Every structure is written in structure tokens, then in C-alpha cells.
Amino acid sequence: QVYTIITQINLKFVRSNRSFGSVYKAVHKDLPGFVIAMKCIQVLDDESSEDIAKEINLLKKCRNNHIVNYYGSYFKDGKVWVRHNKIK
């Protein structure tokens, strides 16, 4: 499932924060108007894995037009990819 999602989008690097991962603008290849933000976080150890899980659980609960909303996450090759709506 992750491979399909990653191969169906074009990623454009936006910014990096070493401790919080890198953010990409993601555009679906077949749906050019479908733009989301994807955050890629390297899982280093069990502690970072727990921190990422806490962040994702918090994001799942938040729904507001003034913050970034959560739309799913995927684990692939030691990295967690988190989908967010795109901030304008």
C-alpha cells in the first residue's frame, strides 16, 4: 500500500528540520489538483518510534481549519510518512 501511494505522487522538497523530519509538497500524478503535504520522519530507535506514535495519535484527534490536519501515515524503509492537508 505504501509503495503504491509513494509511486503515485510527485514529491517536492519544502523544508527540513533534523529533529522533526522533512516536509514535502505532494502532487498526485493522475490528479494534478490533488495537493497534500507529506512529512517524512526517520525512525531511529524505540524512543523515537514512541514519540512519533504520540504525535500521530494527537494529530488524529485534531480537526480545525487553522491547523494542519492528519490524513494517514505509512511506514516504509525505516521512515514514517505522515499525510497532512496542504497549508496555503
Image: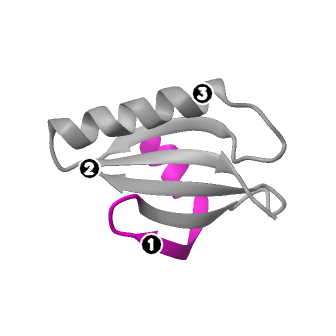
Q: Is residue 49 left or right of residue 27?
A: left
In the rendering, at what x and y percent does residue 15 appear?
52, 75
Q: Which residue is mark 1?
A: 16
Can residue 1 be seen here?
A: no
> Counting residues from the N terminus, which is met first, the one under dot 2 or under dot 3?
3
Q: Is residue 18 magenta?
A: yes
> Counting residues from the N terminus, which is met first, the one under dot 1 or under dot 3?
1
**Residue at the location (26% across, 37% down)?**
49
Q: Is residue 29 magenta?
A: no
Residue type, mark 2 in image: Asp
Please provide the residue range marked out in magenta. Answer: 1-20
Give the quarter of the image for residue 75.
Answer: top left
Label disc, if present, on residue 60 of the rendered structure: 3
Q: How many numbered marks are there?
A: 3
10 Å neighbourhood of mark 1: few (<14), some, or many (≥20)?
Answer: few
In the rendering, at what x and y percent does residue 78 appear?
24, 48
